[in-house]
Image (spheres, rainbow, N blue to C red):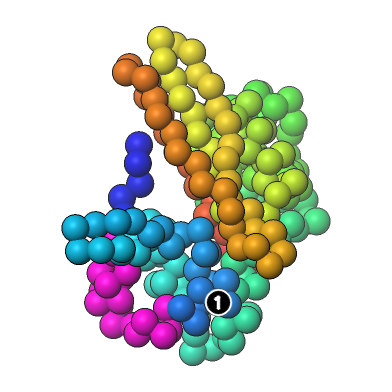
Amino acid sequence: MSEELMTKKELLDMFGISYGALYRWKRKNLIPDAWFIHKSTVTGQETFLPRDRVIERVQTIMRLKDTMSLDEIAESFVPQKSAAATEKDEIILRGIADENQLEAFAAASGKAPPYRWHSLLELAVYAACGDYHAAQCAADFMTENEGEASLYIIQKNGTAISFCAGSFPKSGQGSALECRLVFSEGCEAEQYHLSEMINNLNEKLR
């Protein structure tokens, strides 16, 4: 279940960006501090980043940086809770969920469209994981917290357990929480990156 990592040098070489640019983006919170993972290697201390997430994030930054300031780009990555309700056809059109997922979600939640932001987040997570109670847990968790977080669903012998864990910045202290998970033999575990799911949802709602 562990996420594939890439070294800082691999990232810089892939996009042809400088060390200074990368850390300027980090200081501006375009790339979360929690993504910079320091590990000891045979050659000394090295910095790694989550491959898929950081590649997607750098691609977005490079696409926007000629038309937006770094502060504006950083603001676009902050979850925005839309107050407007979204109808069924619009939900499907924007790719938040397909018709089957929407019908299953409505049956599981007892709620029919239109949906406001919190229910849309529940729906987006449900469309990814297929577990309404886990989606409900994730939406409540991310409504109360802002930062990098993941939903974990662990299954063994037909029983599923879900929980959320994250790294949330405190004023002047950076992101302090590191979570290490060890699973017994026979467990199947899935990880869903909630912060990225929120960003994707907001993009679809724009």
Q: Give how far across and how far down residue 29 sits, in percent.
A: 57, 71
Q: Is residue 46 left or right of residue 136?
A: left
What residue is disc 1 on?
27
Q: Is residue 65 left or right of residue 79?
A: left
Single out the residue that lies furthest toward the left.
42
Q: Which residues are magenta?
A: 6-22
Rendered position, 160 above or below 20? above
Q: Locate residue 204: give its quadrant.
A: bottom right
Single out the residue that lies furthest toward the top.
157
Q: Is residue 11 magenta?
A: yes
Q: Identify which amino acid the numbered label 1 is placed on.
A: Arg
Q: Quadrant of the N terminus?
A: top left
Single out the residue that lies furthest toward the right.
83
Q: Locate residue 110: give its quadrant.
A: top right
- Rendered residue at 66%/33% (across/down): 137
Q: Is residue 127 left or right of residue 20?
A: right
Q: Quadrant of the C terminus?
A: bottom right
- Rendered residue at 25%/69% (across/down): 10
Q: Give how far across and how far down residue 167 sits, in percent.
A: 58, 51
Residue 143 versus residue 204: which sits nearer the camera?
Answer: 143
